[in-house]
Image (cartoon, helix red, strand yellow):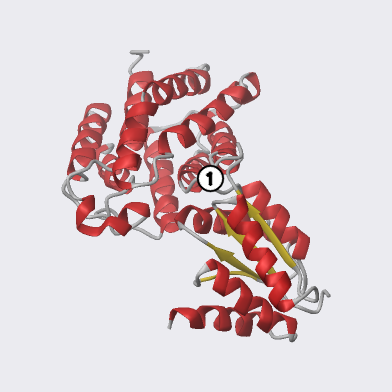
Amino acid sequence: MTDCVGIVIVSHSPDVAKGAADMVRQMVGEEVRVAYCGGDPSGGLGTDVAAIQAAIRAVNGPKGVAVLVDLGGAETNSEMAIELMADELLGEVVLCDAPIVEGAVMAATEASGGASLAAVRATAEEFLS
Amino acid sequence: MAPDLTRRLREEAVVRIIAHVDELTALDQAIGDGDHGFNMKRGFEAITALGDELDALSLGPALQKAGMTLVMKVGGASGPLYGSFLMAMGKAMTGDPLSREDFVGSLAEGVAAVKMRGKSEAGAKTMLDVLVPVLDAVTADDPLAAARQAARDGLEATRNMKATKGRASFLGERSIGHLDPGARSSALLVEVVCDVLEGKV
């Protein structure tokens, strides 16, 4: 559904990224678009700018994309990825300052109801407050 | 500017990074996640693999290409940090031949890009604690000697700092007493540039 905000999960670990996406699928369902990536370009723990771009591309849409990250490098690499693909983005792409699993589930729940990107982000970030 | 400058910088940087992988790993194991040495090695090996394609470029475009390679290949925060540094420097390096003012100006752009990307300033126990003093030093009468000294002093100053940015900030007070691995790799690369420019390697 391209009228929903897309969700991207970026973890240092491919297993954590997939696991978080699995939880979103099971708890929120198929109507929300979720993409994920984890691991550095050699397959070790880390993040990969090209993989992050591919994940964003997979859920790219006019309502925008909310990105959930785990640790520092995931955030820096995601910001870099977004900047480098600015030309091809159909909507705004934002990083949510939220725990990756809980944030992804909350963001996806909000997104599945057709909420705006700002609302999706705010819901994900409520976990911190 | 020497025509083979790009090649000499490229070749010496990877040699020096590989020679110090274990040291960077040990520093990062103490206060980070231990991947800085291997991440830098992977990034600089990817730059090495560009070979003639990179060497054929003048310094500005070569730095941009090398920076983009680090962004795509490193896998840790050091990729976007060093990548943004080189890309911003390269983009600003338009003078031909390159004057000292051009060089200082492009270095300033690079340092500004690191601050923006890392949302940080000097004093947070990061690579900026080397790069900011080096930027200040290159306007001295003997810029290379001043840059070497500033890099050494800047690195050493990170030992007693408490990290407030990056993974080491999780450790809070316990980060005190260790050199910052990013500051170490930055100091290493400053030495490489000075050695190449002075014709020592």
Identified at 22% across, 37% down, the residue is B150
Does residue B17 appear in the picture of this structure? Answer: yes
Direction from residue B43 to residue A28 in the image, left or right: right
Identified at 45% across, 44% down, the residue is B78
- SS state under label 1: loop
Identified at 51% across, 61% down, the residue is A70
Direction from residue B89 to residue B188 in the image, left or right: left
Instruction: Where is residue A16? Give x, y as percent.
Output: 58, 57
Instruction: Where is residue B37? Give x, y as percent.
Output: 41, 33
Please name the amino acid that badge 1 sits on. Answer: Leu
Q: Is residue B65 above or below residue A47?
A: above
Q: Nearer the viewer, residue B33 or A77?
A: B33
The quadrant of the image that shows the C terminus of chain B is top left
Q: Nearer the viewer, residue B158 or A14?
A: A14
Q: Residues within 10 Å of mark 1 (few under 14, many from 20)?
A: some
Mark 1 belongs to chain: A
Q: Is residue B115 above or below residue A22?
A: above
